[in-house]
Structure formats: C-alpha cells, structure tokens
Image (cartoon, rainbow, N blue to C red):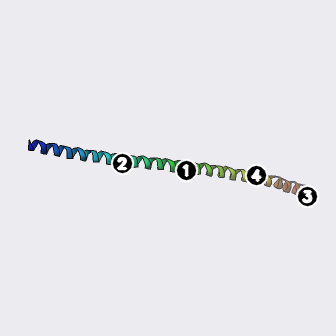
Amino acid sequence: MAEGQGETTEGQGEMAEGQGETTEGQGEMAEGQREMAEGQGEMAEGQGEMAEGQREMAEGQGETTEGQGCALPRSALIVRESSARR
C-alpha cells in the first residue's frame, strides 16, 4: 500500500509538472501572438509610410510637369524671336 501511495504521489507530481509546462506553453503562445500583432502593426505603419511616399512622389511629378509647362512657352518665344530676326 505504501508503494502504491508513493506511485500516486509521484504521478501527482508528474501531473503538476505537466500542468506547469502547459501553463508555460500558453504563456509562450500568448507572447508569440503579441509579437505577431506588434509585427502586423509595424507592417501597417510601413504601408502607411509607403503610401505617403507615393503621394509625395506623385506631388513631385506634378510639380515637375508644372515646371515644364512654364518652360515650354518660354522656349517657344525664344524660337519665335530668333526666327523673326532672320
């Protein structure tokens, strides 16, 4: 009987250890999920910055086009003046 109780106690010890490992595993899983959520947040932030960069690039191209629009009539005037001198 004493031997049976010893095995029961040992079994309970192993069960408690198993529950401890389960709890530890759940903690690691929760930490992993937090890191994943943080990673998704950083990814969303990165996409926002990329969209902002694209907007700035489009704005820059608009300014370039506007600058070219100002330059074209001026060059056309220079051509007309040189033709008139001949």
* Secondary element at tag 1: helix
Which residue is disc 3 drawn over?
Answer: 85
Question: Circle 1 sits on which residue?
Answer: 45
Taking the spot 20% from the left edge, 47% from the top edge, the residue there is: 13
- Residue 79 is tagged as none
Q: Which mark is residue 66?
A: 4
Inspect the image, locate mark 2, and give the three-letter code of the amino acid beneath it. Answer: Gly
The amino acid on which the numbered mark 1 sits, given as a three-letter code, is: Glu
Camera-nearest label, 1 or 4: 1
Number of the front mark, 3 or 2: 2
Q: Residues within 10 Å of mark 2 (few under 14, many from 20)?
A: few
Q: Which mark is first along the chain, 4 or 1?
A: 1
Amino acid residing under circle 4: Glu
Q: CA distance from mark 1 to mark 4?
A: 31 Å
Q: Quadrant of the N terminus?
A: top left
Residue 60 horizontal/vertical position (percent): 69, 53
